[in-house]
Amino acid sequence: MSEWVKKRFWTEVSVAETDDGFAILLDGRGVKTPAKAGLVVPTHAFAEIVAEEWRAQADTIDPSTMPATRAANAALDNVRGQMAEVAGLITDYGDSDLVCYRAEAPDSLVALEAEAWGPIIDWAAHRYGVRPVVRYGVVHEPQPAALLAELRADVARLTAFELTCFHDLVAMSGSLMIALAVIDGFDQPGALWTISRVDEDWQISQWGSDEEAEALAKGRRRAFMDAARFFFALQQAA
């Protein structure tokens, strides 16, 4: 398929192993990405997640319910051809990472940030051999060059599919280090999502929330958790 269809036209969805990975088939015919590449993914586990999205479609196709398919399309049509550029954009988060910039006041927020983000700083210092520098306030100061080089090297090792999922972990949390902690298995994705929300949750505790903000937060959490699930499915051997 060269574009999203509006009506379901297939009966059976299956996964077939190919020389390049695992293809998603609709009534025996391979699915195409929007750029007309074959929808072939690296692992059977991830292929089954994509296939299940197609199986779950009713009479009318709803792309918003198919995040794994969208991720696969993005990896094949966009990320695969510009790996260095995407990796560079993602790594830039590390120089102004969420967990390295702390509030100067009030004391309650300062304490919450320290409790939530201190373990991530400790983990990064142990993993990379360079301790991230914590700043107070909003004035940017660069992180040590040696740390940024290590972060860049970690991101550069990711495949196109992994990098696509990893991008969403970074973008949804606002933190390269939290995203790296997810894929390193430092803690459960849900717990790491929660610590990315310390500032927002503190604001809500002080001033309350609203429906629009709650809906946005739920959508971002869902995207973060999906990205983690997809990433780990890409790690599973066939």
Image: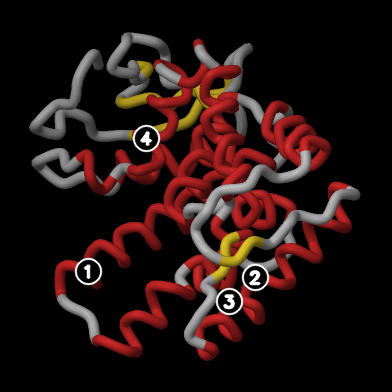
Residue nearer the viewer, 67 or 216:
216
Q: Residue drawn at (57%, 35%), measured in percent from left and top?
A: 92
Q: CA distance from mark 4 to mark 1?
A: 27 Å
The residue tagged 2 is 117
Name the N-terminal-most of marks 1 and 3: 3
Q: Amino acid at mark 3?
A: Glu
* Image quarter in which the N terminus is found: top left
Q: Of tags 2 and 4, which is closer to the observer? A: 2
Name the N-terminal-most of marks 1 and 2: 2
User: Quick one: label 4, few (<14), some, or many (20+) residues within 10 Å?
Assistant: many
Q: Amino acid at mark 2?
A: Trp
Say which element carries label 2: helix
Q: Is residue 106 above or below residue 220?
A: below
Q: Of tags 1 and 2, which is closer to the observer? A: 2
Residue nearer the viewer, 203 or 61:
203
Q: Are marks 4 and 1 in contact (CB under 8 Å)?
A: no
Name the N-terminal-most of marks 4 and 3: 4
The residue tagged 4 is 69
